[in-house]
Each structure stands twice: as structure tokens, then as C-alpha cells.
Image: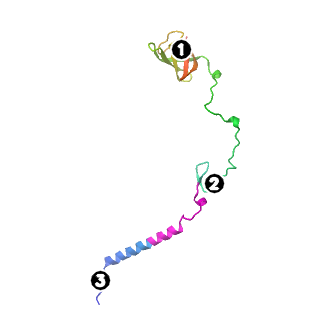
Amino acid sequence: MGRSRETMGKKEKEKKKAKKKQDKEERKEDRKTNNSKGKSLDDMMAYIDENGNITSKPPDPLTRKKEINLEDIQLGAAKIDESAQEVIRKGVVTYFNEAKGYGFINDLRSQESIFVHINQLTEPIKERDKVVFEIERGPKGYNAVRVKKAV
């Protein structure tokens, strides 16, 4: 009989093959020990507490229960008490087109732009005039009425 024809490269390949097989067996055992199949639904559930942290315990509804008075619930937008607002306001005309008959006044108190029509003027106005006026609620927002130049 002749000598074995195993070479060094062949031995190394066999060692690598055995190592891969052993690694594969270790991964298989690891999967078996950490298997999540067969767990109950409660074991797999996660909850979020009031601070945004994930917990395994469900929140207790009895401790967080608050009594709410039905009269305190407000439906819709808050109502503006028009009587509490200033009756006469001051502002500056930012835009006025005499040909079209309308313009806008910048309210100095609230810095909002309020529409003004030529029919609501008591005297002629131009841009950058200081004016005093009252406001009324219109279909598209507030309108300036009884507009006159400030003294």
C-alpha cells in the first residue's frame, strides 16, 4: 500500500468544514433555547406607560381614573366676549385703493390686518394715515367701521 495522499490544503479544508458544522450546531442550539414560539400572548405583549416607556405590565386603569364634570367640557371654539374688547381701536392704514373702494388697517394693539370698506369711512384716508376705528364681525372676519383719522 502506498502513502496517504492527504495534503496540507486538504486537512485545512476539512478543519474549516468541521468548524462550520460546529458553528451551525451552536446556532441551532441557541435558537432552541431562545425560541419565542409557544409563548403565551401575555408574555409577548408590551405596554407603554404615561411617560412613553415600554413595560411588560399593563397600566392599572383604576389608579389613573379621573373624575370629569360634564359642565366643564367645552364643545367647539372658545367664544369671544365682544363686550370685553376695546370699543375704539387705533391703527395705521397699510393699503387703500380708492378706485376699488377697500383697504386694510393694521391694528396697533393686536397687529392684525383688518378689512375696511369705503362706505365705512367718515372722512377720506390714504396709506400710512393713523386712524381710529371700531370693529364688527363680518362674514369673513373683522371689518373696520366708523373709521376716521386720528388727531
Circle 2: is it few (<14), some (14-19), or many (20+) Cα within 10 Å?
few
Looking at the image, is 3 positioned above or below residue 148? Answer: below
The residue tagged 1 is 131
Please tell me whether mark 1 sits on a helix, a strand or a loop. Answer: strand
Cβ atoms under marks 3 and 1 closer than 8 Å: no
Quadrant of the image containing the N terminus: bottom left
Q: Which residue is mark 2?
A: 58
N-term-proximal mark, 2 vs 1: 2
Mark 2–mark 3 contact, CB under 8 Å? no
Q: Position of residue 32 (x, y in %)?
A: 52, 69
Q: Earlier in the sequence, mark 3 or mark 1?
A: 3
- Magenta region, residue range: 24-46
User: Which residue occupies the foreground of this view, 99 or 53?
Assistant: 99
Q: What separation in Å lies between label 2 and label 1 (alpha carbons)? A: 63 Å
Q: Main secondary structure of the magenta part?
A: helix
Within 10 Å of the Cα at label 1, are there few (<14), some (14-19), or many (20+) other Cα atoms? some
Give the residue number, with chain letter if any, for mark 3. 5
Query: Gap between marks 2 and 3, in whole Å?
Result: 68 Å
Q: Left of 3 or right of it: where is 45? A: right
What's the amino acid at mark 2? Pro
Instruction: Tell me the mark number nearer the camera, choosing from 2 and 3.
Output: 2
Q: Amino acid at mark 3?
A: Arg
Q: For the residue marked with disc 1, what is the amino acid?
A: Val
